[in-house]
Structure formats: structure tokens, C-alpha cells
Image (cartoon, rainbow, N blue to C red):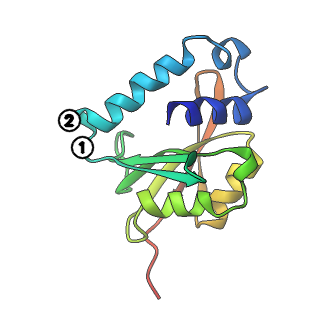
Amino acid sequence: MARVNVRCWQETYRGLMSDAVLDDPGFLAARERFWTAALTDERYRENRVAVAERDGELIGIAMSGPPLDVGSTWARQLYVLYVYAADHGTGAGPALLEAVVDPEESVALWVADPNPRAQAFYRKHGFVADGTAQVEGGVREIRMVRGRQHSR
């Protein structure tokens, strides 16, 4: 999962984020520590994690959990959704999203801006930008939210 995380950051954020961060020799180990905690630490017990595989190899990862934003009005937050660029368009992204967020839940996420492909993916799945932006790690992000989807 850490390898998918690192490679996807390198594919997605090259040019938006410092090469020193993306190519840091300790980056993989830091992500390994993060995923070990996310999967085992009691603090993350409310989180949902999913992976996508092709031919026995991980190609995508996702994680959602309770919102951290103070005063949030949504039930869940999508924290991680990455699929290798070579596997975009295979259905892995929508499957990961569905695995970690129920249609009945309102949900929010932060997405890099500019990142037109990701933003278009989220719009296609019912998310809209709510006008909130922040800079995290030198990368501008916008918040997108989706209300409860009513089953038809």
C-alpha cells in the first residue's frame, strides 16, 4: 500500500509538489509507518480501507474515516483514493470509492488544484466544489462535497 501511495504521489503531484519531497529516500518508509498505523492503531478503528488488485498486484488504495474538519456537516471524509495512472479508466477508482463510502453517507474530500482529471472523476461521482481551498504541503487543494445519494 505504501508503494502504491508513493508511486501515485509521484505520478500525480510531480510539478505541483517539491521533487525533494517526492524523491525523498525516506518517503516509502514514512508511508509504511502511516499505513501500519492506519491498519492497526485504535485511533483509526472507524476508518474503512480498500485496495484494488490486478493479476495479484496492488494497483490502487482508498481510505475514508470520520471527518477531521471542525464544524463539518458531512458524515465521512475520503482521505485517500489513488490508482496507478496506467490503470485509470479500468473501473478501479469507482470500485474503491464505493468500497469506502456508502451512498447514503454525505462525504467530503480535498483534491489538489490543479488536478483536472481527479476533479472530473469526483464530479462524475456527484461531488461539487464548495468554494473552500487550503494549501497543504505546498499544494493548493479544494474541498469537494457530496450529499447523501438516494437509492432509486
Residue shown at the point (73%, 16%) measured from the top left: 19
- How far across and how far down the image is residue 126, in percent? 58, 67
- How far across and how far down the image is residue 98, in percent? 48, 64
The amino acid marked with disc number 2 is Glu
From this viewpoint, which residue is outermost toward the bottom?
A: 152
Q: Are marks 1 and 2 in contact (CB under 8 Å)?
A: yes
Q: Which residue is mark 1?
A: 45
Residue shown at the point (56%, 31%) measured from the top left: 3
* 142 relative position to 78: left or right: right
Asked which secondary structure carries label 2, the reply is helix
Taking depth in this image into account, of 60 and 19 the one nearest to the observer is: 60
Taking depth in this image into account, of 103 and 30 the one nearest to the observer is: 30
Crowding at dot 1, Cα within 10 Å, few <14 / some 14-19 / many 20+, comes out as few
- How far across and how far down the image is residue 128, in percent? 60, 59
* 117 relative position to 126: left or right: right
Picture quadrant of residue 44: top left
Distance between mark 1 and mark 2 Cα atoms: 5 Å
Picture quadrant of residue 36: top left
Residue 69 in view, yes or no:
yes
The amino acid marked with disc number 1 is Arg
Q: Which residue is mark 2?
A: 42
Residue shown at the point (51%, 59%) measured from the top left: 97
- How far across and how far down the image is residue 42, in percent? 20, 35
